[in-house]
């Protein structure tokens, strides 16, 4: 199994713990945690593209 698949549950866990430590309302926690999860995945994708571009040999 590829190690990159572990990034999805890790990002979900980080976003839920981070958000739950700041808010008490369950709907608000779910809404903000989902947004944070997508932001984490987006920035990881940007970093992946940058690293791929730097390692690509012309």
Image (cartoon, rainbow, N blue to C red):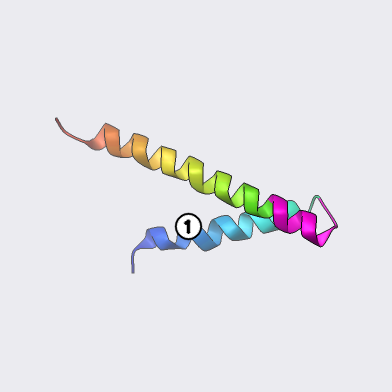
Name the image quarter holding residue 17.
bottom right
The residue at 68%/58% (across/down) is 16
Is residue 58 shown above or below 39? above
- Residue hosting label 1: 7
Lateral position of residue 41 relative to residue 18, left or right: left
Q: Residues within 10 Å of mark 1 (few under 14, many from 20)?
A: few
Q: Position of residue 7 (x, y in %)?
A: 47, 57
- Work out whether 23 lies above or below 43: below
* Foreground pick, 14 / 42: 42
In the drawing, does residue 48 fall left or right of residue 18?
left
Q: Position of residue 21 (x, y in %)?
A: 78, 54
User: Which residue shows up at 50% across the image and 59% down it?
Assistant: 8
Give the main secondary structure of the magenta stretch.
helix
Residue at 25 percent across and 36 percent down: it is 55
Name the residue furthest bottom: 1
Q: Position of residue 5 (x, y in %)?
A: 42, 62
Q: Would you say residue 20 sits in the magenta stretch?
A: no
Where, quadrant-wise, is the N terminus in this rendering? bottom left
**Residue 18 visible in the snapshot:** no
Magenta residues span 23-32
Above/below status of 29 relative to 36:
below
Q: Is residue 12 left or right of residue 29?
A: left
Residue appearing at x 56%, y 49% in the figure: 38
SS for tag 1? Answer: helix
Residue 24 occupies which quadrant of the picture?
Answer: bottom right
Q: Quadrant of residue 50?
A: top left
Residue 48 lies, in percent from the top left, at: 37, 42
Residue 30 seen in the current view: yes
Please state if 7 lies on the left or on the right of 54 as rendered.
Answer: right
- Judged from this view, the residue extending furthest toward the right is 24
> How many numbered tags mark residues here?
1
């Amino acid at each position: 199994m590829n190690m990159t698949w572990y990034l999805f549950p890790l990002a979900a866990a980080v976003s839920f713990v981070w958000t739950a430590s700041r808010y008490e309302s369950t709907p608000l926690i779910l809404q903000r945690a989902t947004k944070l999860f997508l932001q984490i995945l987006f920035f990881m994708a940007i970093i992946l593209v940058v690293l791929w571009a730097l390692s690509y040999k012309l």
